[in-house]
Amino acid sequence: MPATQFGPLRGTGSGKFDDFAWLSYFTVLVREPVFMELRRAGFDLLGVPADIEFRRKQPEPLMELELWPSAHLHPSDCPKQCDICGRHLFPFRPGFGGLADSGKRPRPRLDAARFDATIPLQRIFEWPTILVASESFAGFIEKQGYTGFTLTPLELL
Ligand SMILES: [Zn+2]
């Protein structure tokens, strides 16, 4: 896959992190104590420690989540695929352009028939920069009062 990186995330960090820290608008890191709490609560999250060097003496371990593109857009919303590389061609640039320019959050409609609600957090196959939380996961992180995320309800068709 283009732009795929292998191995643990490496870099330097400083400052205070939210419970969910965003490296980009689609790559999320989770503070290790929160990651452990989520695992204990029964959410089957996979993650690897990010290899981040902190300037502070007290390092704050962060986990990089492994999120699979297992959710799918509803077929009626599915964009055309490129004949050559198979990439889905959106009429706008998700996230930064298009919908974001109009001040609206993108609200993809998901295919209910292919949605596995037992996966706490996943990506959309045709639009992998969007993260989808299951209802129970979204409810839990909200109830716990974790910081660093915004939830937008999505429709299952
Ligand atoms: Zn292409």
Image (cartoon, rainbow, N blue to C red):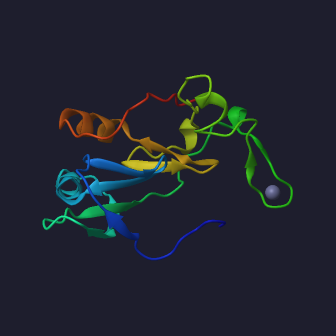
Find residue 28 and report its horizontal and vertical position in percent: 39, 53
Q: Is residue 22 above or below residue 94?
A: below
The residue depicted at 46 percent of the width and 47 percent of the height is 116
Q: Is residue 31 left or right of residue 85?
A: left
Question: Quarter of the image containing the C terminus?
Answer: top right
The residue depicted at 20 percent of the width and 33 percent of the height is 143
Question: Quarter of the image containing the N terminus?
Answer: bottom right
Instruction: Name the outermost residue toward the right.
Output: 83
Find residue 129 and report its horizontal and vertical position in percent: 55, 48
Figure quarter occupied by ligand 1: bottom right
The residue depicted at 32 percent of the width and 58 percent of the height is 45
Instruction: Name the outermost residue toward the left.
Output: 58
In-front residue for pair 74/151:
151
Q: Which quadrant of the figure has residue 149?
A: top left
Q: Is residue 142 above or below residue 121?
A: above
Q: Is residue 69 above or below residue 134?
A: below
Find residue 98 and report its horizontal and vertical position in percent: 67, 31
Instruction: Name the outermost residue toward the front.
Output: 55
